[in-house]
Image (cartoon, grey):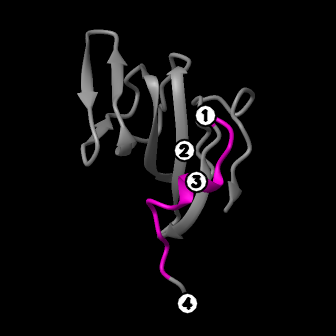
Amino acid sequence: MDAVHVFEKPGRVSDHWTPKIVAQFNGHDILVVKIKGEFVWHQHPDTDDFFFVLKGHVVIELRDGQVELGPGDLYVVPKGVEHRPVAKEGAELLLIEPEGTPNTGDPETAVAKHWI
């Protein structure tokens, strides 16, 4: 068994907004993702959305405000709450979500997730 070097994994990702699975536990995917710019407004009706900033700065926009995050900060968007992550300069995140959760909240528009 090998340890997962979480801070090194985003270096293996070239595209933005394409979460990559680095581990799993109890039916959940642990993912890393590079982000830059604005994501689509979306919600997850059946699960909370966990964000942990590895590098950079992220704003989680909510319809009634926003949450600013820097390296080492985490925020959990409650299920059903519409939100949009924004990273003007680019950022790297660790995500934890139930296996198979679509990143857009909609299986029709979600990207396929692969292991790295």
Q: Nearer the viewer, mark 3 or mark 1?
A: 3
Residue found at the far top of this picture: 64
Q: Which residue is mark 4?
A: 1
Residue named by callout 2: 33
Tag 3 secondary structure: helix
Are the residues flagged by discs 1 and 2 in contact, CB closer than 8 Å?
yes
Checking the image for residue 17, the label placed there is: 1
Above or below 62: residue 2: below
Helix, strand or loop at mark 2: strand
Q: CA distance from mark 4 to mark 2?
A: 23 Å
Where residue 31 appears, as percent x and y from the top left, is: 53, 54
Q: Do the CB atoms of the residues marked 3 and 1 lie less than 8 Å apart?
A: no
Contact? badges 4 and 1 (CB < 8 Å):
no
Magenta span has 61?
no
Q: Nearer the viewer, mark 3 or mark 2?
A: 3
Tag 3 residue: 11
Q: Is residue 81 left or right of residue 42?
A: left
Q: Specify the amino acid type for callout 4.
A: Met
Specify whether residue 15 is painted magenta.
Answer: yes
Q: Nearer the viewer, mark 3 or mark 4?
A: 3
> Tag 1 or tag 3, which sits nearer the N-term?
3
Amino acid type indicated by mark 2: Val
Q: Amino acid at mark 1?
A: Trp
Q: Residue at x 35, y 17 (%)?
A: 61
Alpha carbon distance from label 1 to label 2: 6 Å
Q: CA distance from mark 3 to mark 2?
A: 10 Å
Magenta stretch, residue numbers = 3-17
Among numbered discs 4 and 1, the one appearing first in the sequence: 4
